[in-house]
Amino acid sequence: MHNQSLLNEYFSTKWKPNSNIHTYSGPSVIAQKIASHEQVLDIGCGQNPFRALLPNVVGIDPAFEQADVHCTIEQFETDQLFDVATCLGSINFGSRDTIELQVAKVVSLLKPCARIYWRLNPGRQDHADSACQQIPFFPWTLEYLNKLADKHGFRQENAQVESGASLGKSVVRLYAEWHR
């Protein structure tokens, strides 16, 4: 298990959001793929950027006051099922067991015909602030994400590696969509 208080402190005080630099996984790009009637769960919503872009969003985050619900994905409870989940940098911390529990929880909150949009850190401590060296980033690969998609009855589509000048020369993130 990871240290949630360490993550909350780092992300609420050190990390600076700049999500629209992502070619595939910026909120404005993802929002164009979501119909206005769809119910969206934004996991690790940070400053809740989808709130301004989509009408039916529930943003959860343990570290940011802008979240609709202040909790981790493990703590989130609702009777509502969602059409779409966004996990844009939020399911990135801890052991394989922690990651698998979190992914299973996300899947349990979705309708039978649902999508998940992913942005994942492949284990790189490459944030601008050196305090990120304490963060236990999980070493994601697109192959492992595809294995989890199969396990949960999804097909992985549009898998991409995001890197380059817009992210900073040493920054690499993975993007993928799950559909079922």
Image (spheres, rainbow, N blue to C red):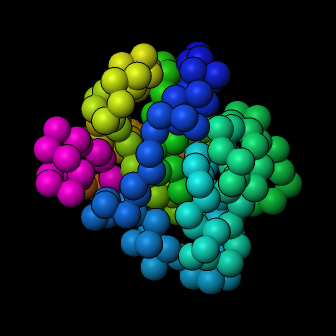
Given residues 113 and 43, the one toward you in this image is 43
Q: Position of residue 125 (x, y in %)?
A: 31, 27
Q: Position of residue 57 (x, y in %)?
A: 68, 67
Residue 10 in view:
yes
Which residue lies at the image location 58% right of the left edge and 49% below the top edge?
Answer: 46
Quarter-wise, where is residue 141 in the image? Answer: top left
Which image quarter is the N terminus in?
top right
Residue, far bottom:
36
Which residue lies at the image location 28% right of the left edge and 64% below the top edge?
Answer: 23
Task: Indicate whether 179 appears above or below 53.
Answer: above
Given residues 95 and 52, the one toward you in this image is 52
Q: Position of residue 85 (x, y in %)?
A: 58, 58
The part of the chain drawn in magenta is: 161-176
Residue, far right:
79
Task: Indicate whether 97 appears above or below 90.
Answer: above
Task: Indicate whether 113 appears above or below 60.
Answer: below
Q: Position of residue 68 (x, y in %)?
A: 75, 55
Residue 53: in magenta span? no
Left or right: 59 as drawn, with respect to 29: right
Which residue lies at the image location 40% right of the left edge and 22% below the top edge?
Answer: 131
Residue 91 in view:
no
Given residues 66 and 25, the one toward you in this image is 66
Residue 173: in magenta span? yes
